[in-house]
Image: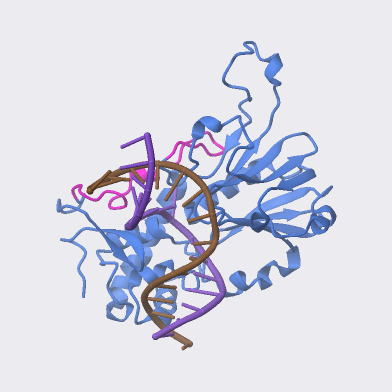
Chain colours: A blue, B brown, C purple
Amino acid sequence: MPELPEVETVRAGLQALLPGKIIAAESHDWPKSFPNSNADVAAFLIGSKIVQVRRRAKVLLIDLSSNYTLVTHLKMTGQLVFVSKTVEDSKLPNSNSHIPYSNDEVRFGAGHPNDSLIGQLPDKSTRVTLTFKDNSQLFFNDQRKFGWMKVYPTPEVPNIDFMVKVGPEPLEEAFTPQILFDRLQRRKNTSIKAALLDQTVLAGVGNIYADESLWGAKIHPATLVKHITAEQVALLHKELQFVLNLAIEQGGSSNHTYVNAEGKKGSYMHFARVFRREGQACPRCGAIIEKSKVAGRGTHTCPACQNQR
DNA sequence: CACTTGACCTGTCCGC
DNA sequence: TGCGGACAGGTCAAGT
């Protein structure tokens, strides 16, 4: 589910709330969602304080005072929900209120199947629960169970296989059009869409922003990398940064309502030009947007202004 | 090595 | 209302 902008939105929100929290307990109901052993958890998590929340590619890194890091991948349907229960249900002015929590509750991530469950966590999709010393909680919900949380010694994080292989961050200054061109050369004989989705080429791009940036650059997603010119790559570089920055500004994309730390909803889908807009008019040329399959993924294109070679 | 496909899971939607 | 199949914002392990 989440791509770079969504994970970055989650990171910023958690960074504003978690530092200083002390972990009092951890529980999980699905071993693959939290593969570390209970003994490890007790030793590395319990009693440690959250120092900071970082991000690399689509991975969240929660650094702890114990010099361990909680590494989290949300995959398709993962979300992190922070709940600070500062008002007891019984103390609410109206005890029948359907708003059992204070405004401190913040829900991060997109795609939760039922937003009415706010205030009723843990729920069916809750895989991991962290309870802090002040009784606030962090829930890792993940309907499809693809995501995971693992604990690593902080100094070893850069040596995790994924971290070693993952490509450059597309929004860092060091990321130039030339670097994008060079990185793409390792996937010369595949489609540009498959190359963009390959995290070893470039970090953080997924299905939405691949389609959106390729539309911006007027490149058909099925175009082979070897047929794309340096000029096209330069334009794609620009469009990637534009789309990712806009999405971060909008708090990410979501088809279900959610709010980030500032109380804003993720509204990039409002700005999407092709993604999930099949059957509608291309905002650039008016042709009808089509949906097909490229690199095994649902792919949205304008048949008129995205040329294929 | 590079590329493609299937697997990992649950839930929803759509056609019969 | 039920059932089968396709599909969903991601990554691995296999296969060719």
**Location of the C terminus of chain A (image quadrant):** bottom left
Range of residues picked out in magenta: A256-281
Residue A168 magenta-drawn?
no
- Percent of width and height locating residue A132: 76, 40
Judge whether residue A281 can be spotted in this image: yes
The answer to whether A182 is drawn above or below residue A28 in the figure is below
- Percent of width and height locating residue A36: 74, 60
Q: Say left or right for A131 vs A266.
A: right
- Percent of width and height locating residue A56: 58, 61
Q: Does the magenta stretch mainly form a helix, a strand or a loop?
A: loop
Quarter of the image for residue A291 reads bottom left
Q: Say left or right for C9 vs A117.
A: left
Residue with the most extreme top position: A93
Seen from the viewer's position, the closer of residues A220 and A53 is: A220
Quarter of the image for residue A261 reads top right
- Percent of width and height locating residue A185: 40, 81
The answer to whether A232 is drawn above or below residue A138 in the figure is below
Residue A274 magenta-drawn?
yes
> Residue at (16%, 52%) from the top-left corner?
A288
Q: Say left or right for A27 vs A201.
A: right
Quarter of the image for residue A186 reads bottom left
> Residue at (72%, 58%) from the top-left corner?
A69
Judge whether residue A172 can be spotted in this image: no
